[in-house]
Amino acid sequence: MPRIVVLPHEALCPDGDVLDATPGETVCDVMLANGIDIEHACEKSCACTTCHIIVREGFQSLDEADELEEDMLDKAWGLEPDSRLSCQAVVGDTDLVVEVPRYTINMVSERH
């Protein structure tokens, strides 16, 4: 069973966490199921960038981002070469280490 190591994030997961995942699940769904309330303003439809993550380890195990995801990522705050939208990053058989950027460009967060 692959694991997702979530690096510490001040608001979402101050101590970091290690999550068990099932191949075929998205990183976003695994995080939400484990109480890490990552933003997903478009309800995981690849229409925003609020679930942006940076995959620090295991990036090559993910399927390539499609054109729509790439276009959305171009708008993400803190974009890096190993950035993905967690709603589109499907877990395979490899462990992942992910970082949630400090900020999003979400102007209407339900949490504020």
Image (cartoon, rainbow, N blue to C red):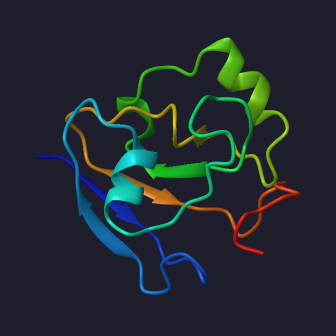
Judged from this view, the residue extending furthest toward the left is: 1
Instruction: Name the image quarter holding residue 68.
Output: top right
Identify the residue shown where x is 69% and y is 48%.
41
In the visual, does 83 lie left or right of 93?
A: right
Residue 82 versus residue 18 in the image, above or below: above
Q: Residue at x 74, y 38 (%)?
A: 48
Q: Is 82 on the left-hand or right-hand side of 26?
A: right
Question: Residue 19, image x and y in percent?
Answer: 26, 62
**In the rendered image of this protein, does residue 25 appear above or below residue 98?**
above
Up the image or down, 10 lies above or below 47; here it is below
Residue drawn at (44%, 68%) of the image: 36
In the displayed image of the protein, which residue is found farthest to the right? 107
Instruction: Tell me: residue 5, above or below residue 72.
Output: below
Q: Nearer the viewer, residue 77 or 111?
A: 111
Q: Which percent across, then down, holds residue 34?
A: 32, 65
Which residue is depicted at the point 76% across and 46% down? 79
Residue furthest to the top: 67
Q: Is residue 13 left or right of residue 61?
A: right
In the rendered image, residue 67, in percent from the top left (x then y), is placed at 68, 13
Judged left or right of residue 66, residue 27 is: left
Work out which quarter of the rendered image holds the C terminus and state it. bottom right
Residue 86, percent from left and from top:
52, 43
